[in-house]
Amino acid sequence: MKMKMIQKIAPFAAVAALALGVAFSSAPANAEGGENPGLKHVDYSFDGPFGTYDRSQLRRGYKVYKEVCSTCHSMNLVHFRDLDEKGGPEFSEAEVKALAAGYQVQDGPNDQGDMFQRPGKPSDPFPAPYPNEEAARAALGGALPPDMSLLVKAREGGASYIYSILTGYEAAPAGAEPVPAGLHYNAAFPGNHIAMPQPLNDGQVDFDDGTPNNLDQEAKDVSAFLAWVSEPKLEERHRLGFQIMIYLLVLSGLLYTVVRKVWSDQH
Amino acid sequence: MSGHSTYKPTNGFTKWIDSRLPIIRLAHDTAVSYPTPRNLNYWWTFGGILTLCLGIQIITGIVLAMHYIPQTDLAFNSVEHIMRDVNYGWLLRYTHSNGASMFFIAVYVHMFRGLYYGSYKAPREILWILGVLIYLLMMATAFFGYVLPWGQMSFWGATVITNLFSAIPLVGKSVSTWLWGGYAIGDPTLNRFFSLHYLFPFLIAGVVILHIWALHVTGQNNPTGVEPKGDKDTVPFTPFATAKDAFGMSLFLILFAYFVFFNPLGLGDVANSEIANPLKTPAHIVPEWYLLPFYAILRAVPDKLGGVLLMFSAIAVLFVLPWLDTSKVRSARFRPLYKQFFWLHLIVCIGLGWCGAQTPDMVITHVGSIDFTVTYLARILSSYYFIHFIILFPLLGLIEKPKPLPESISASVLGAAKA
C-alpha cells in the first residue's frame, strides 16, 4: 500500500523536482560563464528556513553604514522608523528618535512660502548624500553609487556578494588587463574594475559592543545589515511560512485519509 | 451541463429557485453528480489546481492593485511600499509573483498530461483548443504583469517583446508605436499594460467556463483513453474526484508555500530588483522561465521576422493538433512508439528552455573545428519541436501498431488489481 501511495503522488514529486530544477538552474544563467569566481560565500544567521537576523550584528552593520557607506550611498526606501520595527536591529523608540534628530532634513514650505531645515523625525526616510544623480556623478568622478535599499536583492550572490566586494580589493594579478585611471581592482566585481575605492579597512569603525573591528567583521556586519534593508520582513516570512507548512502537512495527511476512506469500497 | 439531470430539489425554497433560475441544479450537475472515469490518476488533479491558481492570482492581484501606482516614476517604489509598509504586503506580492510561476508549472503538467493521454483527440478538439487559448491568454497576462513592477527586466523584457511586432513588414513600426502609445515605452505603455493585466484574468475566467462546459459535454478522458461504457466505469464527481482534487491541491500548496516563504526570489531574476533604466541595458535579457522555450525558438532563427513567425507557430501548431494526430488510439499507454517520442519531446522542450536562458553564442562543445554554440543546439531542438507535431504526429498513427486496448475502464482497473 505504501508503494502504491508513493506511485500515486509521483506527479507531485515530478512537479516539485521540475520547479526546484528551474529555481536552482536559473541562478547562474544570467552571469555569462556561470558563477562569479570572486564570490566568497558567507554563512549568515538569516540563511535557511529558520534563519533570523542577529540584532547585534544589524546594529554594528548600521554603524558601518552610517559612518562609511552613507557618505556616498543613499538608502531611499528605508525610514528611520524601520530601525525599531520587529525583525530588524530593534533599536528602542527613544534611540530612533535621537538618531533621526541627528540629521537635518529639508521641509516646507512654511506659511511664508520658504523651505526650511529641521531635525529629522522617525517618519522621515534616510536623507540621501547627494540631491540628485548628476550631483553624485559630478562629485565622484562620473561614477554613481547605487542606492542601497535593494542592493542585496539586486545582485547575484546577495549579501555574500557585498561581503566579497568589500573584501575583494587586492593587487591586480600578473597578466591581468591594466586597471584604468580612477578605477580599482576588485576580485568580486564583474569585469574586476570598480570605481569605488576600498571603503573599509581594519579598525575603521569602533563597535560599541566590543566586537573586534577587523575588515572581515565589518564587511560581514554591514552586508548583513544591507540584507535586512533589502528584506525587512524576512523573519515574519520565515515564521509564518513554518506555521503554514505545518498546517498544510497536517491538512494533506487528513485529506489523504479522506481519499482512502472515500475510495475504500471502490477497488 | 449535459445529459439528464439527477438533481431533485428537496424543499419549497429550492423548488421555487429551481423553477426560476436552476442554478443549484447547475452546481449539482457540474460538481456533484457529474460522472468521472473511475481510473483517473493524480495527473488529473491539475485542472482543479489550475482553478485554484487563477483564484489566488485574482484575489491577491485585486488587493495589490489597491496599492500599486501605474506611473513610471512611482511604480517601482509603490511595489516596495507594498513590500515594506502594507500589512502582509510582502505576502500578497510574493504569493502573486510566485503564483504566476506555480500557475505555469500546473498548466504545463496539465498540457503534457493531455498530450500523453491523447486528451486533445475527438471528441475533445474544442476542449483542447479552448485550453490552448487559455494558455495564450496566460502568457499575455504574465507578460503584462511582469512589466508592472518596473524593474530592469520588466522594462527590457517589454522592449524586446514589443519590438518583435516591428518585424511585421510595412506596418511593423506603426504597430509598435501603437502598442507603446508613443515612440518609446513609457507612461502610456505602463498604464495600458496595467489595464490589460487587470482585464485578461477575467477573460481567462470566461474561457475557463467554456473549457469546463466543453469538458462536461464530452466527459473526461482517462488513462486508458477508452470511453466510459456505463455506470460501472464512472464514479460521481463528489465525493470521489473532489476528495482527490483537494488532496492534490494541498500537496501543490506545499510546493507553492515553499517558494513564497523560503525561496521567494528563486524563480525570478535579480535584475528586477533594480529600477528600470532606459539608458542601461542589462548584460543579459531573459524572460521568466515559463517563456524560455519560445525565446529559444525566436533566437534560433537568424532572421527577425522568421524568428517571430516561428515562435508564434510553436503555439499555433497546438491549435491544429487534433487534426495532425492520425492515431485511432488515445493513450500513450497503448502506443509504444508515440510513448517514446512523447518523452523525447518533453526533454526537447526542457532543453529549449535551457537554451533560452543561456547567451546564444556560448560554446557548448567543439565538433571538429566548429564551435557548437547554444544557437546550434536551439536550432536542432526547435526543428525537432516542429517535426514532432507536423511529421511524427501524422506518421506515427499510420505506422504504429498499438497494444490491445482494454475492453472497458472497469476491466482495466480489475486487470491492474490482479497484476
Image (cartoon, coloured by chain):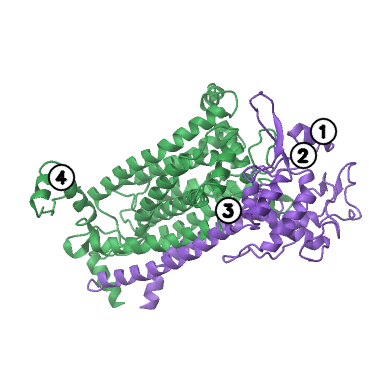
- x, y (%) of residue B348? 52, 53
Depth check, mark 1 against mark 4: the one in front is 1
Question: On the image, numbered disc 3 is attached to which residue?
Answer: B265
Mark seen at residue A138 = 1
- Mark 3–mark 1 Cα distance, whole angstroms, equals 35 Å
Q: Residue lying farthest front? A: A111
Chain of the residue on which disc 2 is drawn:
A
Q: In which quarter of the image is residue B233?
A: bottom left
Q: What residue type is labelled 4?
A: Pro
- x, y (%) of residue A161? 73, 55
Q: Which amino acid does label 3 sit on?
A: Leu
Q: What residue type is labelled 2?
A: Leu
- Mark 4–mark 2 Cα distance, whole angstroms, equals 66 Å
Secondary structure under the numbered disc 1 in the rendered image: helix
Tell which chain the image draws in green: B
Question: On the image, numbered disc 4 is attached to which residue?
Answer: B22
Q: Rate crowding at label 1 as few (under 14), some (14 to 19) or many (20 or more) other CA atoms within 10 Å.
A: few
- x, y (%) of residue A222? 74, 56
Q: Are marks 3 and 2 on the same chain?
A: no
Q: In percent of the image, x 62 and y 49: which residue is there?
A: A81
Q: Colour of chain A?
A: purple
Mark seen at residue A144 = 2
- Mark 1–mark 4 Cα distance, whole angstroms, equals 73 Å
Secondary structure under the numbered disc 4 in the rendered image: loop
